[in-house]
Image (spheres, rainbow, N blue to C red):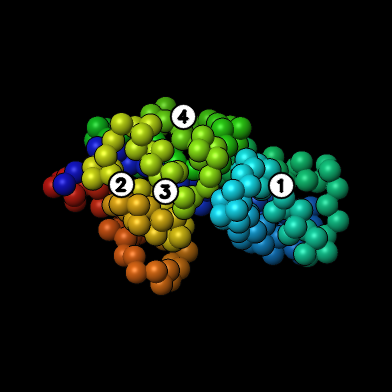
Amino acid sequence: MSFQAILFDAYGTLFDVYAIAAEAERQFPGQGAALANLWRDKQIEYTRLRTLSGTYQPFDQVTRDALQFACSRLGLALDQPTQAQLMAQYNQLAPFPENLGVLQALRREGIALAILSNGNPEMLDPVVKAAGMADVFTHVISADRVKKFKTAPEVYQLGLDTLGATVNNSLFVSSNGWDVCGAAWFGYSTFWVNRAAAPAEVLGVVPNGEGRSLNDLLQFVRQREGH
């Protein structure tokens, strides 16, 4: 069965969130990698806590809160100019090098492409435009519309509702194992872009496809189409 629509996670899948480590290292020499990793972990943790407790805040606020915690935890003095500089990195995250070519190839296959992300529009729009990807996506869909974060089912449903697609003819793509699990539980076919060669989550979920980059996704989709 071929896919009529493919929905992509943004952070870690299309854009390298850990590239922030370079700016973090410039601001806090010797602590860049540690800060980037803790910041990302706490950011995801806060999305889950806020969704579970019904205390939604937009993703940029969650990201700022996570940065403040990470700096406090590492004993780093975070002033307002440094916070602003680090937060600004989210507007210019580097896309992975193969992405644009693969996305353009998928569009030529006649497949509708969309982003389905926890990010709010104020974060997503600049980074998508900076990466030159605005023309390849039919929609950039934010979880902000339902005031919950993935893995809430309402977020995955939002993707289908926006595209006018069904879960049976749609593919969800993420580099985050937990996100793949959430989408699979919802009913999507899934492709795990396992860039870090991480072990699979032990949650009873096996993705329909797995690879190390979007190049592997393109091969997977073409095989499904019988190319």
Viewer-nearest residue: 108 or 191: 191
- Mark 2 touches mark 4? (CB < 8 Å): no
- Can you tell which quarter of the image residue 24 is in? bottom right
Sort mark 1 into few (<14), some (14-19) or many (20+) by Cα contacts within 10 Å: some
- Which residue is more in the foreground, 102 or 153? 153
Please name which of the two marks, 1 or 4, marks the residue nearer to the observer.
Answer: 1
Furthest residue to the left?
226
In this rendering, the answer to whether 71 lies above or below 142 is below
Q: CA distance from mark 2 to mark 4?
A: 20 Å
Report the number of discs.
4
Q: Mark number for residue 64?
A: 1
The residue type indicated by label 4 comes to Ala
| Mark 2 residue crowding within 10 angstroms, few (<14) / some (14–19) / many (20+) | many
- Label 2: element kind: strand
Q: Which residue is mark 3?
A: 153
**Between discs 3 and 2, the one toward the N terminus:** 3
Give the residue number, with chain letter if any, for mark 4. Answer: 134
What residue is pinned by disc 2? Answer: 171
The mark lying in front, picked from 1 and 3, is 3
- Name the amino acid, label 2: Leu
Identity of the amino acid at label 1? Arg
Identify which residue is drawn at 51% across, 34% down: 145
Measure the C-alpha gap from mark 3 to mark 4.
26 Å
Front tag of 2 and 4:
2
Residue 86: x and y in percent read: 72, 46
Q: Where does the image place residue 61, in percent across and percent down from the top left?
A: 68, 43
